[in-house]
Image (cartoon, rainbow, N blue to C red):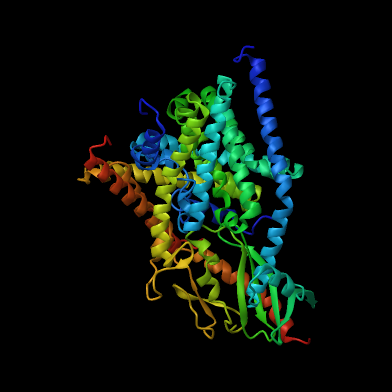
């Protein structure tokens, strides 16, 4: 049975109050390496949002209409990852056909996405929380937008941090992780402002 | 045989996938019973904890649980246990949290004056934020809490626990207002259903 | 990679000088969320160590049979296989921890360290040394996360592995239980580790 949660509340919560990256720590690997550069961050953010939205819906269909009726729930990890990998491939081909210009921006990021834990994470959360189809879609979209927002903010902050005098041992990953910590604190503040969390 | 050939690739992938899936199916089948047993034990423990009934061993849980009865008064199903010379009630309730369904067991005194306690069966809230409803301090707040005007309310400010049994209030969790209000809603919905039955003829 | 792959050299490299967390902050997504309690972290990282070691061993054993075109897919399949085994075992024998870890067990699949070791080491090395490589990589990862969990549990609850160690008068730091503290502690750990490396003259 799906939980009684307004899909819209889920959408807002997944962007702000419990950002998939800042509260659930998902999608960190590419987050830290790509956020050095704002333009790439934007491209990756867009790609993640797109893939999250599509895979959340697709994995919902596969899980609830194929795996559950067949009693194969324990295979979900393998199936989810295969679905994600195939969808990334298909999206890559479609974008290549439809908009070569967009392909140039997004193309290099798409392969990175298959191993982005945020994508698998959203599918697993969707399954364990028994979301309905609509809830899964809004949750997927919200999480993607939240991730996009977080990487853009971090990229902007890192441009400033680069010019700051940082102790040698703290340079690079160290200061970045601590910056993310401050962002996470700021995002928790949304909990008091928005009625959803 | 050419290892890069199409046929080899397809056959290899198929065979590997088949072996792994077969092994997993076996492992899954072997543990299905154990998993079901775990869930049952967990539910029994949760019910006893919510009713404020002490237990130590698994055997003790099973023994005490033998006396727990499922009863129904005016269409409201409750769990009933005579323990320590008094009748105790519990109800399993669920409702939407921030992320998913929260299922709790709510223990209530037979006169409906106070709660006995609560236990969280299942939740999907964020670890470190809403997930703290499953921490001991949060649940301990409900022990013998006085039910004022048929409800349990939240304190205005988040805190580390309101352990005054007569306050009728509990502290909300820092950074998790939504989960806290969900808990209040779920508990009060249950009280609204259960209290008239307890107050009425029995 | 070092030129001579002796077991001790691999140990030092995987646990310290090339520790994937310190150097690239890789693979923390699957585990940082559960670092607020030592027990959860311990089981979770134990799972990662097991999966890394076993998938490295399996990839190395099968490497001559795997067609190039489907290499990544087969590696993913092997990793997913061991992760599901871990998940099934937890569900059956450690149900409370399985519940606390929730979907994070499944996320071990996307842990970049495991795939990275399979690709960079197991693919081109004999089975036993690959097993060792996987084991030590996992241990390096385990060390860092346990260190974070140690501080989070001690300061956030006043307990270690669930046992009260700080006096009741100690006021728990709520921030330590909340997500941001994991980032702060990780940042500080990276800082300390890198500073020591710089002092020792290791290339950073």
Q: Is residue A90 visible?
A: no
x, y percentage for residue B51?
65, 77
Nearer-the-camera pick, A29 or C14 = C14
Tell me which residue sits at (49%, 46%) in the image. C30
Tell me which residue sits at (55%, 59%) in the image. B98
Vertical side of A108 occupied by C112: above or below: below
Left or right for A77, reference A67: left
Q: Is residue B82 visible?
A: yes
Residue furthest to the left: A165
x, y percentage for residue A143?
51, 47
x, y percentage for residue B54?
63, 77
Total numbered labels: 0
x, y percentage for residue B34?
71, 54
Q: Classify the position of the N terminus of chain A by image quarter.
A: bottom right
Left or right for A149, reference A196: left
Tell me which residue sits at (38%, 35%) in the image. C8
Tell me which residue sits at (62%, 43%) in the image. C85
Left or right for A165, reference B88: left
Q: Quadrant of residue B83?
A: bottom right
């Amino acid at each position: 049975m799906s939980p009684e949660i307004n899909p819209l509340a889920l959408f807002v919560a997944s962007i702000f109050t419990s950002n998939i990256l800042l509260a659930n720590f998902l999608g960190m690997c590419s987050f830290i390496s790509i956020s050095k550069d704002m333009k790439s961050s934007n491209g990756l953010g867009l790609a993640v949002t797109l893939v999250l939205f599509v895979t959340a819906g697709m994995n919902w269909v596969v899980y609830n209409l194929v795996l559950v009726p067949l009693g194969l729930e324990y295979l979900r990890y393998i199936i989810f990852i295969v679905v994600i990998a195939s969808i990334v491939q298909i999206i890559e081909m479609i974008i290549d056909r439809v908009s070569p210009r967009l392909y140039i921006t997004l193309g290099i990021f798409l392969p990175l996405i298959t191993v982005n834990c945020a994508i698998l994470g959203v599918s697993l959360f969707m399954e364990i929380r028994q979301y309905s189809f609509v809830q899964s879609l809004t949750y997927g979209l919200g999480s993607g937008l939240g991730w996009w927002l977080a990487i853009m903010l971090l990229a902007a902050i890192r441009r400033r941090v680069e010019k700051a005098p940082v102790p040698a041992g703290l340079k690079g990953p160290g200061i970045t992780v601590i910056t993310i910590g401050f962002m996470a604190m700021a995002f928790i503040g949304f909990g008091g402002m928005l009625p959803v969390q | 045989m050419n290892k890069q050939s199409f046929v080899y690739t397809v056959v290899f992938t198929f065979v590997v996938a088949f072996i792994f899936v077969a092994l997993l199916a076996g492992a899954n089948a072997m543990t299905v019973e154990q998993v079901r047993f775990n869930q049952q034990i967990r539910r029994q423990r949760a019910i006893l904890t919510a009713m404020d009934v002490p237990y130590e061993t698994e055997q003790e849980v099973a023994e005490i649980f033998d006396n727990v009865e499922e009863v129904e008064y005016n269409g409201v199903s409750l769990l009933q246990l005579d323990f320590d010379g008094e009748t105790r009630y519990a109800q399993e309730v669920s409702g939407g949290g921030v992320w998913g369904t929260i299922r709790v067991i709510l223990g209530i005194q037979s006169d409906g004056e106070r709660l006995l306690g609560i236990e969280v069966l299942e939740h999907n809230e964020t670890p470190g934020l809403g997930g703290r409803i499953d921490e001991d301090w949060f649940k301990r707040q409900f022990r013998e809490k006085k039910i004022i005007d048929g409800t349990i309310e939240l304190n205005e400010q988040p805190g580390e626990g309101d352990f005054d049994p007569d306050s009728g209030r509990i502290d909300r969790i820092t950074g998790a207002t939504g989960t806290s209000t969900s808990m209040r809603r779920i508990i009060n919905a249950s009280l609204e259903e259960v209290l008239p039955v307890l107050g009425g003829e029995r | 990679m070092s030129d001579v792959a002796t077991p001790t050299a691999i140990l030092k490299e995987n646990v310290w000088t090339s520790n994937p967390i310190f150097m690239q902050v890789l693979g923390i997504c699957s585990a940082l969320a559960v670092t607020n309690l030592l027990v959860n972290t311990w089981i979770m990282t134990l799972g990662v160590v097991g999966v890394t070691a076993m998938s490295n061993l399996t990839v190395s054993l099968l490497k001559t049979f795997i067609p190039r075109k489907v290499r990544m897919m087969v590696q993913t399949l092997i990793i997913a296989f061991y992760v599901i085994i871990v998940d099934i075992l937890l569900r059956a024998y450690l149900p409370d921890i399985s519940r606390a870890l929730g979907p994070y067990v499944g996320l071990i699949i996307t842990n970049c360290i495991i795939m990275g070791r399979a690709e960079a080491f197991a693919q081109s090395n004999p089975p036993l040394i690959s097993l060792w490589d996987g084991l030590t990589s996992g241990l390096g990862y385990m060390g860092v996360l346990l260190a974070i969990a140690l501080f989070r549990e001690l300061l956030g609850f006043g307990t270690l592995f669930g046992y009260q160690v700080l006096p009741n008068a100690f006021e728990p730091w709520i921030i330590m239980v909340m997500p941001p503290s994991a980032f702060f502690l990780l940042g500080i750990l990276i800082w300390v580790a890198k500073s020591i490396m710089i002092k020792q003259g290791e290339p950073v």
